[in-house]
Amino acid sequence: MKETVVSGIRSTGNLHLGNYFGAISNFLKMQHEYNCYFFIADYHSLTTHPTPSDLHANVRQVVAEYLACGLDPEVSTLYVQSDLPEIAELYLLLGMNAYVGELERCTSFKEKIRKQPDNINAGLLTYPVLMAADILIHRAVKVPVGKDQEQHLEMARTFGNRFNRLYHCELFPEPYAFNYGTQLVKIPGLDGSGKMGKSEGEGNAIFLYDEPEVIRKKVMRAVTDSGPTQPNQEKPEAIRNIFTLLEVVSSPDTVAHFNDAYNNMAIRYGDLKKQLAEDMIAFTAPIREKIREMLSDEARLSKVIRHGAEKARESAGKTVREARHAIGIRHF
């Protein structure tokens, strides 16, 4: 029997190259080797965006983009978090035995209240409980998460083990962080430092849905310097970032050509950026076309999400029924 993997997908904004070479590349491998549940975390988004302008459109866009990247809804289970009322119920049941002190000590809570002091809501405090419910609802044993989510995963183990102990059962297994043991490609942003991501600004990321002219403008604004002052000198971070992007979308010959130019102090950053932009456009073109195709087929998107919800609810319903029974909640 295949082990179960659960992973959340953000429901705000579009996917960018960093997502493609990071989480998505892992998902595409996992779906054929494990029993995978991938969900769009629309409940989670409300902790920081309580009044979204069009949450449904955001979710629809994200579904289309993941399908365009190769996520197969027949092989894995793709669903929207809010389509499973069982998640909300398990969130409530786990929350009854989650202590305020441990939630207040959570690193992400401290960081969020610093970033949004005017919106310190209960959802922020209990975010780890909802994340635990997302994982434990399918009794997952493997969860692909980054370093910033490891504390939440540890808390999911704590809440699951606490439930088992309090109600004298073995309902929840211990979930652990998971990857393929290989170093994922870290895609840098265009601002000269850090990783690619929307939180660092729209101009920092190349989104899979960006039109060619938008990509050209973003790349031409990428941070560079005045050029090398001696042969074979070490590249500063901003220039290393440009070359990293070149390596993931361009041919080895192209990368070698610009490396030689840099080492010989003959580099022209304008030419480098133009080449990078065109190669990015060529790389994203087939994905962009598939996204358009998906978005134009409303019936197909609806069918995928309804099918995913049905599959996910079968697993989730079983878990909640067993949790209720363990607690002593019975129908008369």
Image: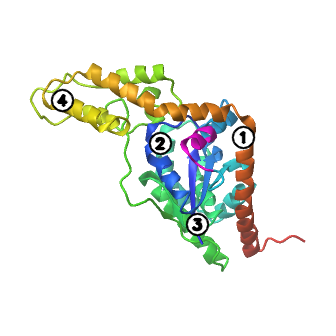
Q: Is residue 206 above or below residue 113?
A: above
Q: Which residue has dot 4 on it?
A: 262
Residue sticking out furthest to the front: 253
Sequence-first disc among 2 and 3: 2
Tell me how far mark 1 sits from mark 4, CA to CA: 49 Å
**Bounds of the magenta span?**
63-72
Sequence-first disc among 2 and 1: 2
SS at badge 1: helix
Type of the residue with mark 1: Arg
Q: Which residue has dot 1 on it?
A: 300
Quarter of the figure with the C terminus: bottom right
Q: Is residue 164 visible?
A: yes
Type of the residue with mark 4: Tyr
Q: Is residue 181 above or below residue 255?
A: below
Q: Which mark is residue 20?
A: 2
Type of the residue with mark 3: Phe
Determine the residue positioned at 23% across, 31% down: 257
Determine contact: label 2, label 3, CB under 8 Å.
Answer: no
Tell me how far mark 4 sits from mark 2, CA to CA: 28 Å
Q: Is residue 131 above or below residue 236?
A: below
Sequence-first disc among 1 and 4: 4
SS at badge 2: helix
Disc 2 crowd, CA 10 A, few/some/many (<14, 14-19, 20+): some
Sequence-first disc among 1 and 3: 3
Q: Position of residue 1 (x, y in %)?
A: 60, 72
Q: Which residue has dot 3 on it?
A: 159
| Residue 147 vs residue 66, the one in the foreground | 66
Determine the residue positioned at 58% across, 38% down: 65
SS at badge 4: helix
**Residue 65 on the magenta segment:** yes
Determine contact: label 1, label 3, CB under 8 Å.
Answer: no
